[in-house]
Image (cartoon, rainbow, N blue to C red):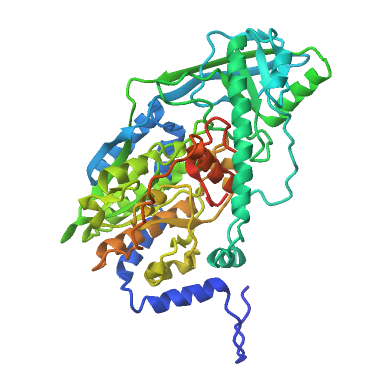
Amino acid sequence: MLARPSTRVARPALLPSALLALAGLAAAQTEPVDLDMVTRLRAAGLGSDSQVMDTVWHLTDRLGPRLTNSPQQRAAAAWARDRMTEWGMENAALEDWGEFGMGWSFERCRVEMTAPAYMRCIAIPQAWTLGMEQPVDGAPVLVEADTVEDLEAYRGQLAGKIVLFGALATPETPFEPLAERHDDESLAELASLVEPDGGSADSDRAARRAAWRARRELSRATDAFFREEGVAVVLEPDAGRRNHYGVIMLGSGGSQDPEEERALPTVTVSGEQYNRIARLLQQDVPVEMHVDVRATYHEDDLVGRNVVAEIPGTDLAHEVVMLGGHFDSWHPATGATDNGASCAVAMEAARLLLEVGAEPRRTIRVALWTGEEQGLHGSKGYVKNHFADPETMELLPEHEHLAAYFNMDNGAGKLRGVYIEENAQVRPIFEAWLAPFADLGATTLTMRTTGGTDHRSFQAVGLPGYQFIQDPMDYGSRTHHTNMDTYERVHEADVKQAATIMASFAYHAAMRDEKLPRKPLPVVDPPREEPAEAPAAAAEDAAATSGETASAETPAADDDGHGEHEH
């Protein structure tokens, strides 16, 4: 039973979220908000007729995973294109953005310890690594090497062998909650400015680069040594970035470039099970294993394609509002929270606008990017083809006509606000647009930038691209790039809320008299000499910033470039 309201004159202190909501209501007095449209979108988006979870199911259980240029990704992209056409969107297409390289998929991965006792291992092959010509049964060899010189102790012993390579995992028992939502305190902290670090970032960056170079040297030497020795398959431990418990986080172990040598069969094994096998070998206990890996490179079509579809505008149809997220995923699971849910949200946002009969002044375009996990390739290619080349900042005609791009890619948690990317001009606009959703928890704007996802491709050429703030949930502790990234981890209420808010943002951006205000165009630095490893080291910087450790050979910036990506 609720307590009766107090009649005392003293006023209770307002929580930060309430203050922000009031600020948004004040802003709404100057920035027009179509509350009738908001009401209709809320009724359609939050009600029982929502189709967002059905879309999530198709993209995950039925069609996932969606590794770029794999048969699964291409089938899912064709389905998304056709589904948006069925809904009444126009110009739906699979649009070329450039050459990506080979696709890859695996058909089988069986890793078993058969003696001294049977144990079926949780194990997944690393992307773009070879399958095995035939299964191998035999005694594994534990290779313990911290330096190139250490490898010589194993010369002549590895032909046809199952090799365990990697230090024993060191699982810790986490005492923090497995999943969490933002509260007033965490949102207030997020909304505050970050103080300068006094130069410590530069020293940290130098240390990361030095560590990366050391890992790269050992990785290259180890790969060459294993090839020379004729190793059958390499088993590596999960690195523990998701606290183990059978959770495996992995990405690529090789290259999608058809001109590069294909990587040896390489499989990531759960940390606890790898440790058991390694400890037995360290104690000279005879171990027998069975390993069978089947994988396929798909090189019939190297072109990468994004999925696009539109709701045509009216009097300002030549101008465009875009919304979307990356469509591709890694392969350990079905890519639900990274990033099938966000694609379903963007698609549902467009469907809601059609359902309520919206007639936007500007064209609203959904874009679902591929190649994001390997470095934002799909959105970068799209931006370069349509708007500008960030290397030269030579603008194309369409650059003038983009009103805004709204991105979702921080898991499947509900929206709590927007990173406004140091653009104070949009604050009162977004405050007004968020105000009708304060009761749904979306109240926060932060001047901070956030990295590692596709809005950065737009920001890089001076376009207004924005990423939503989301509840972290279990994204950083369990699902991100792991074998646990499945349909079950998507909460229906959260993606309904997200689709409704994204639809409203897209609609209001499409209806304004003016496009969203922009920051000054980026200044192109003059060309300078850099060491050959600089691009990879820069990617390693981004990976280390987010707490991820990219592979020694292909440090693809936390696999998808994620910087502050709410891990």
Q: How many marks?
A: 0
Quarter assignment of residue 231: top right
**Is 33 rendered above or below residue 261?**
below
> From where the camera sits, is residue 119 visible?
no
**Is 534 rendered above or below residue 112?**
below
Task: Please state the horizontal and vertical placement of residue 406, each as a whole percent of the image.
Answer: 37, 55
The answer to which of 523 and 160 lies nearer the viewer is 523
Residue 392 is left or right of residue 234, and the answer is: left
Residue at the image position 41 percent from the left and 79 percent from the top: 26
Quarter assignment of residue 58: top left
Quarter assignment of residue 248: top right
Task: Please state the horizontal and vertical placement of residue 81, each as a whole percent of the image.
Answer: 29, 38
Residue 483 is left or right of residue 395, and the answer is: right
Task: Please state the horizontal and vertical placement of residue 170, each as a whole percent of the image.
Answer: 74, 36
Residue at the image position 62 percent from the left and 86 percent from the top: 6
The answer to which of 420 and 31 lies nearer the viewer is 420
Quadrant containing the N terminus is bottom right
Task: Please state the horizontal and vertical placement of residue 267, each as a whole percent of the image.
Answer: 59, 23
In the orientation shown, which residue stands out farthest toward the front? 529
Residue at the image position 50 percent from the left and 49 percent from the top: 412
The answer to which of 420 and 226 lies nearer the viewer is 226
